[in-house]
Amino acid sequence: MSLWLWNLVEALLMVGLAPLATALVKRFKARLQNRRGPPLLQAYRDLAKLFGKQPVLAEQASWLFRTAPYVIFAATALAAAIVPVILVATPLTAAADVIALVALLALARFFTALAAMDVGTAFGGMGASREMTFAALTEPAMLMSIFVLSIAAHSTNMTAMIDTVLSTGLGLRPSLAFALAALVLVAIAETGRIPVDNPATHLELTMVHEAMILEYSGRYLALIEWANQIKLLLFATLLLNLFFPWGMAVDADPASMLIAAGVWLCKLLVLFSLLALFETWMAKMRIFRVPEYLGLAFLLAILGMLTHYILEVGV
Amino acid sequence: MRPELLQQWVTVAAAAMLLIMFALLAQRHMRALLRWFALQGVVLALTSALVAFVAEVPELYISALLALLLKGLLLPWLLWRMVVRLGVHREVEPLVNVSVTLLIGAALVLFAFYVSLPIEKLSQLVTRNTIAIALACVLLSMLMMITRRKAITQVVGFLALENALFFTATAATYGMPLVVEIGVAFDVLIAALIFGLFFFQIRKTFDSLDLKHLEEKQ
């Protein structure tokens, strides 16, 4: 029973801290570019403002357009609840494995694309077509990279994978390095960060995600933005907890949970400052290069699997 | 150091070799290609030195040193000078597009793994796991030679093939006899110099290093 409670707390933490996480990355980036940047609470104020505004709908908008934001938010929040954040063995993680996680994210993406095409603007259709093209390449790469861990753990359950990484300890394992590199590339593409998509601008002909949600306003826009922020935190947590699970709580007592939460926050800070550094240093790539970039992620994931079989199974 | 940790270092070195081979396949720019090629030579030397240390085969240190000087420094420098003098620093032109080449490469790694499974069962060496990777590197460098259009990239592919064979010898039998290795090293050096002459001849005759002109003249 208390495990479910902890799981709920974790999910609420993920959903609640997501705007702060995005604001933090923005802040780090601003500092690196010699700007002051918006205050950290600005993300929450923006969301509150959007929730308070009356949404404006296109005349042709159907029920799909109005329901999609709720589906997107619910699917993303549920995906966030599946990922083990502080505790290794949460009940929802046992109920849904990695494939379910990828499927939930795919569901959210599917509805974003449908809603984008619903009102029939040129931008929406273009964004949707680009997003689905990239999705066809990111999803296999993401699954393959996580499967490298699954093969080692003999399970697609995230708790089992984390346990395996924890029990084998620090070792030099090239397959994990390949999988990590692949998942980092996928995470950057999935969360629409800089080499693939630019999260800061609204009007660029190369935009992908922003083009799809251009028609949204008011509370609908707030839900979608929030879901996006959750996605960033989700991918960061997934990366950290699958590949660097040291410090996570194994038992569910308050003291170790508190320490694990602190460790999680510290790891997030490090990861986000790296992300900000990377985004300041990189330029956005041409959109036609993105499939190649995702192909690289897929290749790295496959190499991870192969090196696991070749180099590590026989040892 | 613990033996399993050393073993892990050997696997890391093998993975690095494989990764560099793929980087060579994916490169678009001539100079970046040469940089990766030089890195391959250095990693090859490090791998040999590592195997020499793990397996306690002192003569491998000499071939490691040879690899470092010849494959890490001298050959890349020679090629670099040729590239600068010929003025080919523009993009590499592959026959098949890069993503497809990389996927074919992944399939080749799988094939190499399948083929080398029985060999690994026979071997008792520390490096037996890396035989498959070494074989994959050989196949990948052959792929690189096939899919490139210009003479100079094909030569880089050829030299990468030599590196991969050296690596295979290290992985399968702790290296060839030193006499053979020194002989091969000088052969490769002379080959690189002769290739240089060929480049200038090809360019003088056809005004380009593209080998399709050679095929037309048949």
Image (cartoon, coloured by chain):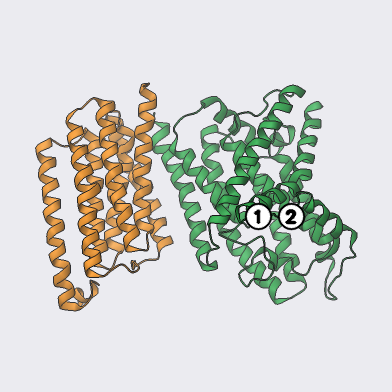
Chain colours: A green, B orange
Location of residue B178 by image quarter: top left
Measuring 57% from the left and 50% from the top, which residue is drawn there? A277
Residue at x 55% of width, y 48% of height:
A184
* Circle 1: residue type: Ala
**Image quarter of residue B76:** bottom left
Q: Quick check: can you spot residue B218?
A: no
> Where's the C terminus of chain B, which quadrant?
bottom left
Q: Position of residue A79 (x, y in %)?
A: 71, 45
Residue under the image location 55 percent in, 47 percent down: A183
The answer to whether marks 1 and 2 mark residues whose Cβ atoms lie closer than 8 Å is yes
Q: Decide which of A266, A172 is in the foreground and name it.
A: A266
Mark 2, residue position: A38
Where residue B7 appears, as percent x and y from the top left, is 36, 28
Percent x, y for residue A161?
A: 58, 33
Residue B8 located left or right of residue A163: left
- The residue at the point 64 percent across, 67 percent down is A207
Residue at the disc numbered 1: A30
Give left or right: position of A188 versus B214: right
Q: Is residue A209 visible?
A: yes
Compared across the picture, whether A28 is left or right of A148 comes to right
- Pick the quarter of the image with the N terminus of chain B: top left
